[in-house]
Amino acid sequence: MRNQNGISRRHMLELAGAAGGLAMAGGIRSVRAQGATKIEQLAPELDKIISTSEPIQELVTGIGNVLGAAEGPLWWKEGGYLLFSDIGNNRRMKYTPGSPGATVFKEPTNRANGLTRDLQGRLVACEAEARRVTRQELDGSITVIASSFQGRQFNRPNDVVVKSDGAIYFTDPRTQPAAPEQWELTYSGVYRVTPDLGTLTLLIDNFIVPNGITFSPDESVLYINDSRHRHIRAFELAPNGTLAKQTDRVFADLGGAEPGVPDGMKVDIAGNIYCGGAGGIYILDSKGKKLGRIVHGAPATTNVAFGGDDWKTLYYTTRTSLGSVKLRIAGIPVPVQKKSG
């Protein structure tokens, strides 16, 4: 059974249960009764990254609803604030450290999901409802980076990353709320757009739900997770920026009995990967070894981002909240706006 928005009854009930009728909250609090919280050490190397006594902070609650979760955290360094997507309420939120709660930054947003910035510091967004990837110019106007492939409209672009040469990589899973017959593409794809936006290339189409996407620090490896399979796959990059498919491998399995699947993910300057999975946020080294897990108590982690002046704060979104935890190592910075002249 589906409602007029195409969402299955089962999916609505699952999300409604996660939302739990929470209201927007101000201030910083410990994550509450959803579950116990802790930093779980799985290997000695975790000591270099985070202390097991580091508090996990809940910053904002009551975001998201049955139409979509909180998602896409993005640190805006020159402004000293974090932007994130409230997909269900079709708006972009702003959280400033030290301020109570979050404020509405922009609405509507075409139910934007993953956010990043390009080399000039312009905002790049995956607009799920409009089924496109866009760039906001410095004057506020919107440039469509990509909206279709070979004449067929995308499914629901989900997450995006920009390489140091300016190329844009994004995932496009076939997910709810659209009914299967509404999709023009018969597969879930991962794509690359050249820096001049002139060429769009389908990199791979054998994922079920390609979701989070990120590069290793030297950009020799592209990590893409498949939420349905609950694992992260890794690919070496060919010289032309496409995937060397013969290097395709399962990098890490993040499934388990506890709720949560791989979703958005990021990499720090040492090559460690941070990604949601069963029971919390996993921290893995560059070989895929599980070093630790941030157990924040919520049923699922939807995305993560580094922030703060030193890029040592890990922000995370769940279906209905925004939280953070301090790290000992910096994340890979997101570009800031280039100054003219």
Image (spheres, helix red, strand yellow):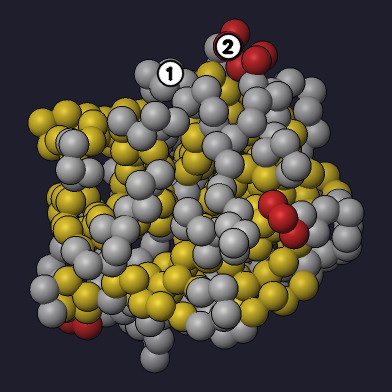
Residue underneath mark 1: 289
Q: Is residue 172 above or below residue 318?
A: below
Q: Position of residue 141 (x, y in %)?
A: 51, 83
Front residue of this view, candidates 175 and 136: 136
Left/right placement of residue 323 relative to residue 119 reads right
Near-viewer residue (234 or 243)? 243
Q: In x, y percent, where is residue 170?
A: 33, 57
| Dot 1 amino acid type | Lys
Report the residue marked by disc 2. Answer: 45
> What is the quadrant of residue 325 in the picture?
top right
Q: Is residue 200 left or right of residue 288?
A: left
Q: In this orientation, does residue 167 appear?
A: yes
The answer to whether residue 180 is left or right of residue 123 is left
Residue 37 appears in the rendering:
no
- Against 72, is 5 above or below? below
| Residue pictured at 78% horizontal, 28% vertical | 54
Q: In the rendered structure, which amino acid carries the disc numbered 2?
A: Glu
Q: Image height check: is 301 above or below 89? A: above
Question: Residue 129 at what x, y percent from top left?
Answer: 41, 80
Residue placed at 22% from the left, 67% from the top? 198
Position of 196 with respect to 136 (left or right) is left
How many labels, in total? 2
**C-beta proximity under 8 Å, tags 2 and 1:** yes
Q: For the residue labelled by badge 1, is the local secondary structure a helix, a strand or a loop?
A: loop
Question: In the image, which disc is placed on residue 60?
Answer: none
| Label 1 neighbour load within 10 Å: few <14, some 14-19, many 20+ | some
Mark toward the start of the polypeptide (2 vs 1): 2
